[in-house]
Image (cartoon, grey):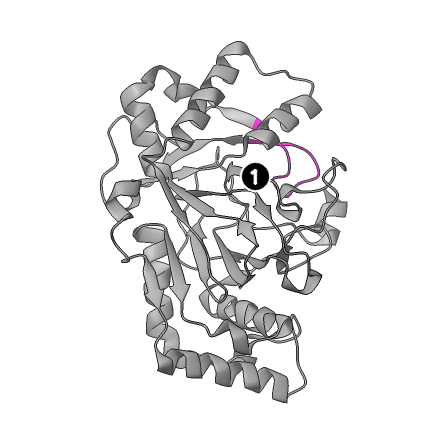
């Protein structure tokens, strides 16, 4: 089972904004040879009359990038917990090309997993939903997206187009958040290790999960306050006053400017983040009047071969189950 960690976390995963503000060590710039390899793989898929998601790893041959991809995987699991891949010449690609490139890279990093009951393997992060419909997910609007983790080992975001204004991406280190809580709000620590009901954990009913877990030497986090509140509402178990205070403290640390790394993703940028080690957010944005120019990112959820083990009170999750699994449940 998970143990309560009582010592501060050290190492690269415990970064704060000041550690990275004047560094670009987290940016991996694609070389001309790497771009040529990706372009050739894209051309290979199209030449065979294939399209997303109807192709496999062998159909997108980028074996020459194996060493680089391994470095990305190591950074995600044992380094900072995130990285930004930059250099794809966005102007030469169609939306369909971006789908093939994003999915193809994902196939070589891990296993893309389902993002909704329909089985989508790439999510369109764009303002296409009705903000007045409670079933609309926040990423389908132009509203502020609170800090959260996604239900997969790694989340990837490929920027296809930027907004007219706003849409800043923000990352926070789980370890840095934990260290600050340990130092300033230690009295709440045990509450984050207890199991809470959380909705939308890729199951039909709210699932029990801890918010923090320390297992086999690694700290993991799972958080989205809205889904915690919804989970307890569905179960008819209102949050207690001290639980609400604990979540308020968690949010205050997440929003501490000293912890946040903000970045504006440019077209062709691919951001990868380990959901166990990093929480992510996005500011609201103003879109272009022309629908063809409106902000669009492609979201990829990956199950990773080098992912950490989870304790039983922090059950692993990688996307939505197959429809037959949902029916059996």
Q: What's the magenta region?
A: 197-208
- Displayed quadrant of residue 52: bottom right
The correct choice, above or below, for 177 with respect to 303 in the image is above
Give the percent coordinates (x, y) of residue 8. 24, 31
- Left or right: 239 with respect to 304? right
- Numbered disc 1: secondary structure: loop
Give the percent coordinates (x, y) of residue 244. 52, 17
Q: Quadrant of the C terminus?
A: top right
Residue 1 shows up from this direction: no
Q: Quadrant of the N terminus?
A: top left
Question: Which residue is nearer to you in this view: 180 or 125?
Answer: 125
- Displayed quadrant of residue 9: top left
The correct choice, above or below, for 160 with respect to 5 in the image is below
Residue 63 shows up from this direction: yes
The correct choice, above or below, for 57 with respect to 250 in the image is below
Give the percent coordinates (x, y) of residue 225. 55, 29
Q: Check if residue 203 falls in the magenta segment.
A: yes
Please rate how many residues cluster around mark 1, counting C-alpha atoms within 10 Å: few if below 14, some from 14 to 19, many from 20: some
Q: Check if residue 317 falls in the magenta segment.
A: no
Q: Label 1: which residue?
A: 144
Q: Residue at x 62, y 89 (%)?
A: 47
């Amino acid at each position: 089972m998970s143990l309560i960690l009582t010592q501060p976390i050290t190492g690269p995963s415990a970064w704060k904004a000041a550690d990275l503000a004047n560094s670009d060590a987290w940016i991996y710039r694609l070389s001309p040879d790497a771009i040529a390899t990706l372009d050739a793989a894209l051309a290979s898929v199209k030449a065979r009359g294939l399209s997303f998601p109807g192709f496999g790893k062998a159909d997108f041959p980028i074996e020459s990038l194996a060493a680089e991809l391994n470095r990305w995987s190591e950074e995600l699991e044992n380094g900072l917990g995130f990285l930004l891949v930059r250099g794809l010449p966005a102007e030469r690609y169609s939306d369909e090309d971006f789908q093939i490139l994003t999915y193809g890279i994902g196939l070589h990093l891990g296993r893309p997993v389902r993002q909704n009951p329909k089985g989508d393997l790439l999510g369109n992060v764009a303002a296409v939903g009705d903000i007045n419909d409670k079933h609309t997910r926040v990423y389908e609007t132009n509203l502020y997206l609170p800090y959260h983790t996604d239900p997969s080992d790694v989340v990837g975001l490929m920027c296809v187009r930027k907004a007219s204004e706003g849409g800043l991406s923000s990352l926070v280190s789980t370890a840095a958040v934990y260290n600050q809580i340990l130092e300033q709000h230690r009295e709440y620590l045990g509450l984050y290790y207890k199991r809470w009901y959380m909705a939308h954990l890729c199951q039909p009913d709210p699932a029990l999960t801890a918010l923090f877990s320390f297992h086999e030497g690694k700290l993991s986090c799972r958080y989205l306050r809205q889904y915690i509140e919804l989970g307890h509402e569905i179960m008819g178990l209102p949050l207690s006053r001290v639980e609400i205070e604990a979540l308020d403290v968690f949010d205050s640390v997440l929003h501490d400017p000293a912890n946040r790394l903000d970045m504006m993703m440019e077209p062709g940028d691919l951001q990868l983040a380990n959901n166990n080690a990093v929480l992510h957010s996005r500011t609201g944005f103003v879109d272009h009047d022309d629908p063809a120019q409106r902000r669009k990112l492609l979201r990829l959820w990956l199950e990773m071969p080098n992912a950490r083990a989870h304790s039983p009170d922090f059950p692993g999750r990688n996307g939505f189950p197959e429809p037959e699994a949902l029916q059996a449940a």
